[in-house]
Image: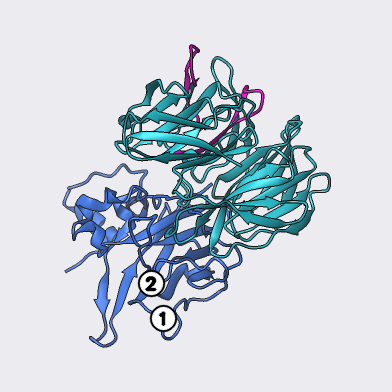
Chain colours: A blue, B cyan
Amino acid sequence: MSFTRRELLERCAAFGAITLATSIPLSSLAYAWDEAEKKRTPTPFCELGPFYKREAPSTSMLRAPGDSGMPLALAGMIYDVRGEVVPDAKLEIWQTDNLGHYDIAGYRYRAVLEPGTKASYAIETVMPGHYPQRVCQHVHYLVTAPGHKPLITQMYFATDPVFDGDPDKNYTRDPLITSRELVRPVMIKGDPKQMVAVVNFDLVMETL
Amino acid sequence: MRGLVPAVLMLSAATAAVASPAAVKVQLPCESSYQMLSPTGAQAVLFCKDKSIHVVNLPDGSERLLFPAARDVNALSFSQDGKWMAAGFPDGTVEVLPAQGAGATRQWKADSNRIDNLYFFADGKKLFVSAMNHPGTIWELTETPTLRVTLADKFGGVSSVAVSPDGKLLVAGGGDTVIRWYDTATWQKTREYNGFLLDTFALTFTPDGKYLLAGGADSRITVFDVASGKELRQLPTEAASSVGSIDFLADKTQVMTEYFDNAGEKPPYRLVWNITTDKSTPVQIDFRPTCGSVVDGKLWLCNTDGKTLTISQHE
């Protein structure tokens, strides 16, 4: 048996578990509870890094046929701190190829996405590589939206060998990882011949 | 840090007036894989493997601990006369202290984010501060430093800054790839250049103040006319490398340009560009330098054998 918040409040009130001031209707209390539960903490920021490039193509397919590296499906939602979706956000995403090289001259593994009212995004790419000046594999994000602070962050993979299987304990091995929250679980899906790494990374923006 | 270029090596003052011996050898007080020279060549800062920072006076080799490892310095810069140093910390604190001798140390919270870049104005009375992802700020270095102005940008903070030789113009390269020009009398933005798609890591005015040279992740130097703000030309590209620094040499037509391999797999290297002919000459060095600065118009390089630090001039 399950109850809506309103039903639960009504039952509690009926059994005397809560006492309501006459001026506060149950619906208001339920709404306040809902709002409190929806609240989200802003996504921790990271540095922009030296290889951000403007005017990336609008595409969700960053992987090309024949590219080396494990395919990666990366998706998420964009929220504000009240838990509401941000309907007019623009995402810029960039990463290295599987060998740890950024495309400076061109736009490989760079994309701009405008998720629209659904505020959800999904890209098909490959697992980024390691490179000498950074400890961990990562994907860069720049998210902008009217009325919100620009969000600059990076997403990391819990499967990164740097973490030795324990990102809780070892995420600080990369000094640029500002929060454990940015290290995301990786699920492997598909059949053995066509495995895909799947990662969910929601973004929470602060209002101005 | 912005990744490629250690922040402690960025934005160190470029002008210098004191000459020193052609080669100096001093004992290392710690294991140090990279160093920074003061603009006058009178001191070398040693970044030690244990994360402490020492300063060595040249040529006598006397040294002192500047910051213990626990201070976790992220940015360090000399004033242009070499008399003061500014250090930036992860918690947004900035400390200005005498490079040698006595003087009051000033410490204040300049930002909530990590301090990435520091740049002294020529008079030593103002300090440009930029923190990760935040707009650049100008601080008056009074007894209690005061915020003079915040230089707004879209996002990404400031990667490079330069002040014109007459002090009237400040140019800042933003992480958002925009180059912004400011009148230092009013601090109003006077111009914006949106022609770059990538970040700019080095900005330098010509000694006569007529031209501005910019270089960064696009692997080449772009020359601007200061009076009009227009892009005049771009020097040839160095493939797969970023411009990390641009410094004028003594003859004022040549610039020493340091390049960093974008993949981080090869050591940095240097080219001398003649900006009247747009031709370059590689700097031939038979060792891997652990520092490089233009002091008094000449290239000074460091070399270590683990126990000693040798600093030499190169023509």
The residue positioned 80% from the left and 42% from the top of the image is B210
* Percent of width and height locating residue A160: 27, 63
Amino acid marked by disc 2:
Asn
Q: Is residue A121 visible?
A: yes
Q: Is residue B204 above or below residue A97?
A: above
- Report, in whole angstroms, how far the alpha carbon at label 2 lies from the one at label 1: 8 Å
B261 left or right, relative to B154: left
Range of the magenta residues? Answer: B98-127
Q: Which residue is mark 1?
A: A67
Please state which of residues B24 and B74 is positioned toward the viewer in this rendering: B24
Q: Position of residue B184 (x, y in %)?
A: 73, 32
Write down the chain letter for disc 1: A
Which residue position is annotated with label 2?
Answer: A98
**Where is A19 relative to A92, above or below?**
above
The quadrant in which the N terminus of chain A is found is bottom left
Q: Residue at 65% of width from left, 45% of height from top?
A: B203
